[in-house]
Image: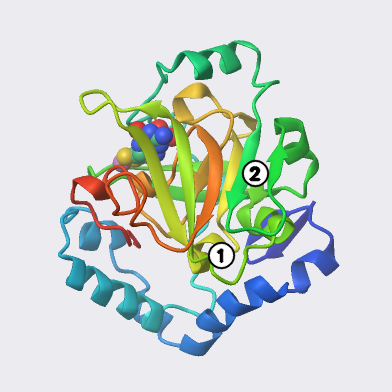
Amino acid sequence: MITGWYGIDTDAPREQRRELPASQRRAFLGWAAVGAGSLLLAGCDRLSRTARVPRVLRSAETLTRDAQHLLGSPLGLAPTYSKADIDPVFRANGTTDPADPGYQALARAGFRDWRLRIHGLVEHPLALTLADLRRLPSQTQITRHDCVEGWSCIGQWTGVRLQVLLDRVSPTHRARYVVFHCADTMAGSGDRYYESLDLREAYHPQTLLAYALNGHTLPVAHGAPVRLRAERMLGYKMAKYVMRIELVESLAGIAGGHGGYWEDRGYAWYAGI
Ligand SMILES: Nc1nc2c(c(=O)[nH]1)N[C@H]1C(S)=C(S)[C@@H](COP(=O)(O)O)O[C@H]1N2
Ligand SMILES: [Mo]
């Protein structure tokens, strides 16, 4: 386990962490182009600036995103914390026990039969077991989760960088978004939870598919067997119970067309904090 690169623990071989594949290089150039100015943001209460205003107008949302891209440091890393900062109990929110019978059967069998499908606009579609994921280079990070409802929790997440998986499937040049399809249907609507990121956020070095929380197998309440961690985003972006990942050119054809279960109900798609 090597500590310190990006302030993150990782056991990825050094050469893997240094060399940017072409796909990531594209996203990286975006960060590198923006440069200095991050100090301006230091010390602000990030949560109170954004978290209480979920219903951002779509135009204002674009403005927020562009401003953050301009002000962000080249890598735009979310803050990381020490072990002493970890909250003893990580609050669970939204679905905490999916009712879907297929999911429940998978959970009863310890997710042995679960397969993570990665498909859509990719050269090499994949289906991975949990054991496959655990064999890939892992990354551990202690971060703060900010829910739009106004609470936060600090926890330690371990998983595989989404970047590692994307490099294996090779998104085609048409792919622009990564969609996460979840196992749970939401009370009331009966619609399935889903979320999406653009490639820039998907290739971000802190974006993980996490299978452990605070050193333990991810509990069902927090999204077993894997959940997304997109550390620069609000909590609702971090899809739990991920069943398949789809690369698409446009979000228009999926569910309500706004890129996520809550987005289809008026929340901002770009939920950067
Ligand atoms: N599949 C799924 N993912 C989800 C949700 C959900 O209801 N279903 N809730 C979201 C919200 S609003 C938050 S704050 C976080 C909560 O994650 P936690 O239960 O680990 O705290 O998950 C997000 N991801
Ligand atoms: Mo949330």
Please, what secondary structure does the residue beneath circle 1 have? loop
In this view, 167 is above or below 192: below
Residue type, label 2: Gly
* Residue sticking out furthest to the front: 253
| Residue 43 x %, y % | 34, 69
Is residue 100 something one can see in this rendering? yes
Q: Which residue is mark 1?
A: 204
Q: Residue at x 47, y 50 (%)?
A: 179
Q: Residue 25: image x %, image y %?
A: 65, 78
Q: Is residue 81 visible?
A: no
For ligand 2, the image quadrant comes to top left
Q: Quadrant of the C terminus?
A: bottom left
Q: Residue at x 56, y 75 (%)?
A: 27
Q: Position of residue 78 (x, y in %)?
A: 47, 62
Quadrant location of residue 215? Answer: top right
Residue designated by label 2:
159
* Residue found at x 36% / y 46%: 235
Depth order, front residue of 71/42: 71
